[in-house]
Image (cartoon, grey):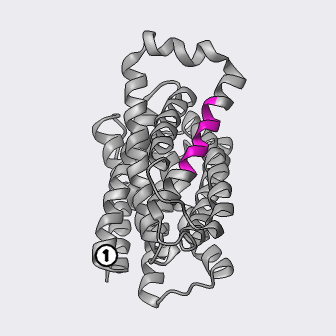
Amino acid sequence: MLSYTGGIVLVAALLHASWNAMLHGNRDRFLSMTWMSIAIAAVSTFAVLVMPWPARAAWPYIIASGLVHIVYNVSLVRSYRRNDLGQAYPIARGSSPLLVTLGAAVFAHETIGPLHALGIAMISGGIIALALQGNQVSRAGLLAALTTGATIATYTVIDGMGVRLSGGESSAYTAWMFTLYWLMPVLFVATRGLPALWTPVRSAPMSVGSSLVGGLVSIAAYGIVIWALQSGAMGAVSALRETSVVFAVLIGRVFLGEAVSGKRALACVVVAAGAVCLGL
């Protein structure tokens, strides 16, 4: 992977950890995710009006990815209900790079070199080490986080294949995929009712506002990843993006008051070393 692309994906990793921290920091994560989705869908709907259309071959992937993202959103909310950010986030993100590498090999016939393979292994190993520290992860919490990781791997492979068929229109591909996020408020209203969605606009405007900002950050974060997937190996891009766990641990410590042990710090160093391997 070119160093320029790797640097941009690291920026995406920071952005990704930031919006996850915003989500985790809100008490009602389902409500927060819904308002994030409204911001994402609204901006994307406006964007598609002024962008060229992706090539026809990309549309099945756009639709499939959008639907998988909805499953991902729900799984992420469930995961954050049961675990700290420093636990749920590493489990969800750490289980995906190896799955993405396998999926890319099977479905896109991608191969990677030994150094990149080592980097992916170090990043996944470091992330898993972060997740397994302590004994506070319940079986239900572990299952929710692993389900989230599986959905991450699924939509990453779908998008890696789809954006390469978009005719070079990665931004349009991203925007059209994100328009399917309108399904999140539909799901929320169907389960809780419309008043539950609108009442917090007056009763908790700061929480709604932070969710809207988080949605905008999410667009930038994943838009960068889809751009990188056009030319970068899916497993390498996914692994480099998952260095966001290092940022998540730091954010969890500084802003959410979560503990960072020496072992957790060492695991972060391993993740960072893996990222260096991917950049070489």
The image shows residue 225, relative to residue 134, as above or below, that is below
Residue bearing the label numbered 1: 276
Q: Is residue 242 visible?
A: no
Residue lying farthest to the right in this orientation: 190
Pick the front one: 260 or 16: 16
Which residue corresponds to the image point at 67% horizontal and 19% vertical from the top-left?
192
The verdict on residue 181 being magenta is yes
The image shows residue 108, relative to residue 113, as above or below, that is above
Mark 1: give few (<14), some (14-19) or many (20+) Cα within 10 Å.
some
Name the spot of residue 154 as percent of width and height, x first.
64, 62
Name the spot of residue 33 as percent of width and height, x first.
53, 34
Q: Quadrant of residue 166?
A: bottom right
**Which residues fall within the magenta stretch?**
177-185
Q: Quadrant of residue 264?
A: bottom left
Name the spot of residue 4 as percent of width and height, x first.
28, 74
Pick the front one: 24 or 88: 24
Q: Would residue 102 be found to the left or right of residue 126 on screen?
A: right
The verdict on residue 273 being magenta is no
Q: Main secondary structure of the magenta part?
A: helix
Pick the front one: 201 or 46: 46
SS for dot 1? helix
Q: Is residue 143 visible?
A: yes
Task: Check disc 1 and give the amino acid type.
Answer: Val
